[in-house]
């Protein structure tokens, strides 16, 4: 999530640069501008990944004289090239590794009676819910805990390739 936010913020900063030009002539060095923008994007992503505040987006000096339309085009090119790079893959992989999954009650947090009731309700072919039995089996759980328990039991059943009874 932080990586996505970093990339979006960087893109917005680069896109905002298009309004900072004093001129609309294309007299600047486009290749040098693109290189500077790529470096700026990489620095911003690195800063964000390390938890430091991202640098404020400014038009790189190498982009002086590059018109807004060209700068906008370069922003798209630089971002696309970065998004398709190995570095982007590594940043995304690191973000996934550091993500903390939501707590799902398993084992002793879901009583055997509650687990059995959830399984019966998930596997039975009726369209009704035996709320009385559910309240008796899982009555001490909050709605959020019950939702998490249902999700946990559902995942176990899916992993076991369970099929509904006829």
Image (tube, helix red, strand yellow):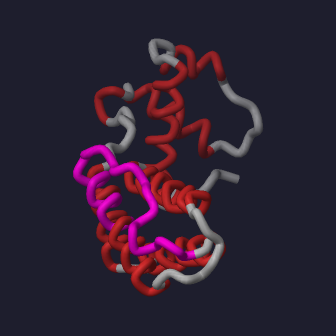
Q: Residue at x 25, y 46 (%)?
A: 51
Q: Which residue lies furthest to the right in this view?
A: 127
| Front one among 106 and 63 | 63
Can residue 160 be seen in the rendering of this structure?
A: no
Q: Which residue is drawn at 57% across and 22% down?
A: 134
Quadrant position of residue 87:
bottom left
Q: Position of residue 21 (x, y in %)?
A: 57, 63
How many tags in the picture?
0
140, above or below 155, in the image: above
12, above or below 138, in the image: below
- Is residue 109 found inside the magenta-colored segment of the image? no
Q: Position of residue 114 (x, y in %)?
A: 46, 27
94, above or below 90, in the image: above
**43 with respect to 153 (left or right):** left
| Front one among 70 and 102 | 70
**64 with respect to 3 (left or right):** right
The boundaries of the magenta stretch are 41-66
- Is residue 50 found inside the magenta-colored segment of the image? yes
Q: Position of residue 17 (x, y in %)?
A: 53, 60
Q: Which residue is drawn at 44% across and 77% down?
A: 33
Can residue 72 be seen in the rendering of this structure?
A: yes
Q: Where is residue 53 in the image (x, y as percent from the top left)?
A: 30, 44
């Amino acid at each position: 999530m932080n990586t996505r936010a970093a990339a979006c913020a960087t893109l917005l900063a680069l896109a905002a640069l298009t309004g900072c030009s004093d001129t609309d002539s294309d007299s600047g060095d486009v290749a040098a501008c693109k290189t500077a923008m790529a470096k700026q994007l990489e620095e911003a992503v690195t800063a964000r990944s390390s938890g430091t505040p991202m640098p404020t987006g400014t038009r790189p000096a190498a982009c002086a004289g590059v018109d807004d339309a060209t700068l906008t085009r370069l922003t798209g090119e630089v971002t696309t090239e970065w998004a398709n790079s190995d570095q982007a893959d590594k940043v995304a992989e690191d973000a996934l590794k550091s993500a903390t999954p939501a707590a799902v009650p398993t084992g002793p947090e879901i009583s055997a009676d509650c687990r059995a009731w959830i399984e019966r309700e998930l596997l039975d072919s009726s369209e009704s819910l035996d709320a009385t039995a559910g309240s008796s089996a899982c009555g001490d759980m909050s709605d959020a805990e019950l939702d998490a328990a249902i999700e946990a039991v559902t995942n176990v059943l899916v992993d076991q390739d369970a099929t509904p009874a006829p």
